[in-house]
Amino acid sequence: MAINTYAHLTSSQCITCQVHAGYSINVPPSVRVQEGLCVTIPCNFTAAYRNTFSNSFGYWRREPPDSYYIVATNDKSSPGRKPNFYLTGNPDTGDCSLKITNARKEDAGIYFFRFEENKNSPVKFGFNDKAKTTVTVIDLTEEPVISDPWTVIAGINKTLTCTPPGNCSATALVIQWKKSNVAGVWENSSNVTFTPSLYDLQENITCQMTNSNRTTTEKTILLDVCCPPAMIITWEIKEKKRNKATSITVNEGSSVTLRCSLQSNLPLNMTWMDGKNDILQHGTGTELELRLGNVTMNHTGTYTCSALTKHVINFTSINVTVQYPPRNMEITIKSSKGREHSANRQVVINQTDTLTFTCKVDGNPAVSVVWVKGEVDTEIPKTSNSELSAMINVTSSMPDVYRCLAWNALGLKEQRIHVKQGNPEKTATPWSGDIAIGFVCGMGITILILLLYKLTTRKKWTKKVTYMTSEEPSASMEPPIQDIYMNVNKPKEKAEEATNNNIQLDSPGVTLDDLHYSTVAFTTKSSKVPSSHLETVYTEVKVK
């Protein structure tokens, strides 16, 4: 970066100069900058008694022998401009500050500022009378700056940054790193990242800075690698010795004390947290306890102790596992016919059915689960199958008491099912009776509808259909029960009969083609009808 050195003023020199009525400038008469570094020349001015303008332009020029060459401006249409000179000020606010980067020997010279309000304004002025600035470029002597070299922790990545002095982005400088326990150049960059270890203790790290004239300066630091304080967690349960471990198993209902200790002489901020990063305990010192009383399943998890040092947070953890006897036993009963039974203490099985009993249970340590048939006491096997469920199939030939047994080192749990033979429709489900009642009611309604339909249909036929015959039935002939006979004679065959019976054929709308004769007999009982009782009935039928 850069270093600014201002010359002392003499009687003929000034920092603020009134060079003309209404025109003044405040600028240092001389500055010095080291080769390869940067310098900012502060500058502000007034023109026409004002320091606020619009769309104005500023120009920094170099005096002869460069024929007033423009080195920096905000006028993009202006030729010239040196690549390492920048007008950083805004002329619209009366700011004419100039910045020089990567200073070179040939940049030395005398410079002055010229102002133009805009292209069409008469306010134009060159501050080249008693308001010049002399720039001197001297040899590079300043050392580079290494950022934050004092917080080096073993095992934690560290980044060091080497920069030129004076807050300057000097791109022409070459930065290199060297390390006393590494041969040659360690890194060619302004930044270096490494993981320090105890072997780096008291080692030298050097940053070298070289300009375009091959002048080199350097800065060396001595690594002071420190270690985070060691942390240990011990636990203590009633009637058990205090131990060091990364995990612990606790029986449900008991209490345990977790103790976090620091191997440090300085008191530090310490914190106990659970797996959800909730703070459970906080304190300052070298030891912090956490007591878990009346432990339940909810206490299972990871507990972390952390300590905040000046430069780093150190932490260590312990896993707590809670043991409990078998619990949450669940029995399901499914029929081979796809029906699911409620797990009552008594179940009825049909002769054609097979029931599958499944028993599930929870527990820690691992639970062993078996089905046992009968009421006889059974000795728990010494070996564990470490299964959380067991299954058995039961048929109608196997009525008995079935027991689900689940056990681990902390206890035993049992549940019984009594299986009986019988009609599952009567007792298997509470809603089987409702189904039967619904079925009977449905059948009754169906039969009633059919009877009503048949009666209605029969009445229609009784009104509209007659027995029709061309000859009178003989006396010995017995009409069939519920049979309907129909014979429609031609008009000519019955015309004479109609005449004999005084039937008027000349009635309006009646012709011989429209006249038909039939004999109709209705019988509902098996009885003989003498021919002498038979009567012929004539009716008029119109065809529409």
Image (cartoon, rainbow, N blue to C red):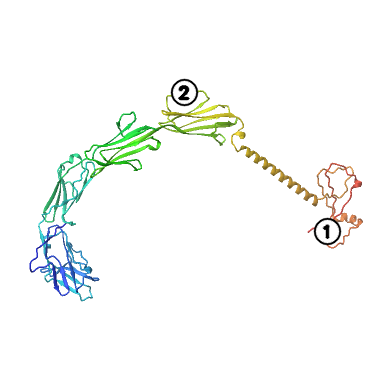
Whether residue 75 is visible here, answered yes or no, is no
Residue displayed at 72% across by 44% down: 448
Task: Tell me what residue is drawn at x 23 percent, y 39 percent.
Answer: 229
Q: Nearer the viewer, residue 227 or 211?
A: 227
Position of residue 455 relative to residue 369, above or below, is below
Q: Check the picture and name the quadrant holding the C terminus.
A: bottom right
- Which of the labelled discs sits on residue 513, or is there none? 1
Tell me the CA gap for discs 2 and 1.
106 Å
> What percent of the width, then of the height, locates residue 410?
41, 29
Locate residue 258 relative to residue 147 in the image: left or right: right
Residue 286 screen position, x and y as percent: 25, 38
Kind of residue sitting beneath label 2: Glu
Q: Is residue 121 visible?
A: yes
Q: Which residue is mark 2?
A: 379
Viewer-side residue, 193 vs 149: 149
Percent across and percent down for residue 442 are: 67, 42
